[in-house]
Amino acid sequence: MPFVSLKDLMQAAEAGKYAVGAFNCNNMEIIQAIITAAELEKSPVIVQASQGAIKYAGLAYIVAMTRVAAEAASVPVCLHLDHGTSFEQVMQCIRQGFSSVMIDGSKLPLEENIELTNRVLAVARAVGVSVEAELGRIGGTEDNVSVSEREAFFTDPEEAKYFVDKTGVDALAVAVGTAHGRYKGVPKLDFPRLQKIRELTGVPLVLHGSSGVPDEAIREAVALGVRKINIDTNIREAFVKGLREALAKDPEEIDPRKILGPAKEEMIAVIREKIRLFGSSGKA
């Protein structure tokens, strides 16, 4: 089937009180693993491309590979741009056929973030493409900041209300204690803040940097209104684990299929686990 919009997936997730997994792709094997896992779990799914993925694989390759997978899939597939950096890049992705885009103006002053988001929305809405925005700053796990400094980057609930009132975005990425990359300790999510943002905005919320977040924290976040959950690091870990094991078993192996095949199986297992955790299994 053709790509579905994020908005449609979010409306269904809202009605069913579950979250849809957004899994980052970098190559063919990862795309195949995401779609296979979603089909086995009978779950809607979001395939997303980051800046790094676009640079590595090329925009046209990512769109073409995901389109081939989606058209043969028995579950709804959304192709989403993760952390779009500029109006121009977002437009490029819309022209190439993405069904959803994220414009990340979180480093800008509030009014400029609103202005940029509305510029994107004006074009995206006209062609049926969904828009995710970000408020507050989701750092990396390597960012060396104290707790008080960290919380200064957290999403302010009142600002979130103002932002959503002024834009009407389809989904909002919030900073409540997660980070991109591998965690050194256990991330602690600010659930009261998450609840307040949800109460004030009513919009589907997005959790970035969710790979190292404990299962019980994910369940709590979903219960509080998180409807899209991003996973990247766990997929990379599974991919490399499969590769290492295949090469350890036979260091002389030179057939890429025999090395990448086990990597794909590891990724499928991890993605299926996440889909069940998010509550979207059986919802396609």
Image (cartoon, helix red, strand yellow):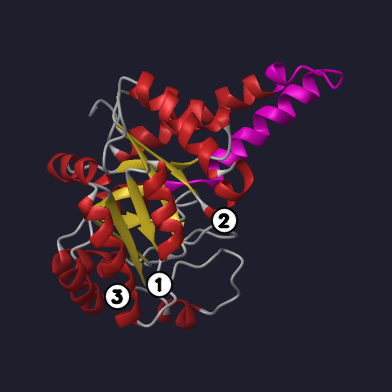
Asked if residue 251 lies in the magenta stretch, the reply is yes
* Residue in the picture at 59% in, 52% down: 52
Dot 1 amino acid type: Ser
Dot 2 amino acid type: Gly
Range of the magenta residues? 230-259
Q: Mark 1 points at which residue?
A: 106
> Closer to the camera: disc 3 or disc 2?
3
Can residue 248 be seen here? yes
Q: Which residue lies furthest to the right in this view?
A: 252
Q: Give me the C-alpha separation between circle 3 and circle 2.
A: 29 Å
Q: Mark 3 points at which residue?
A: 115
Can residue 188 be seen here? no
For mark 3, does the 10 Å Cα neighbourhood hold few (<14), some (14 to 19), or many (20 or more) residues? some
From what the image shows, is residue 59 above or below residue 1? below
Q: Is mark 3 on a helix, strand or loop?
A: helix
For mark 2, does the 10 Å Cα neighbourhood hold few (<14), some (14 to 19), or many (20 or more) residues? some
Dot 3 amino acid type: Glu
In the rendered structure, the answer to whether residue 259 lies left or right of residue 8 reads right
Q: Give me the C-alpha separation between circle 1 and circle 2.
A: 18 Å
In the rendered structure, the answer to whether residue 91 lies left or right of residue 146 reads left
> Closer to the camera: disc 3 or disc 1?
3
Nearer-the-camera pick, 139 or 57? 57
Nearer-the-camera pick, 204 or 167? 167
From what the image shows, is residue 115 above or below residue 35? below
The picture places residue 92, in percent across and down from the top left corner, at 44, 52
- Mark sitting earlier along the chain (3/1): 1
* Residue in the picture at 32% in, 43% down: 99
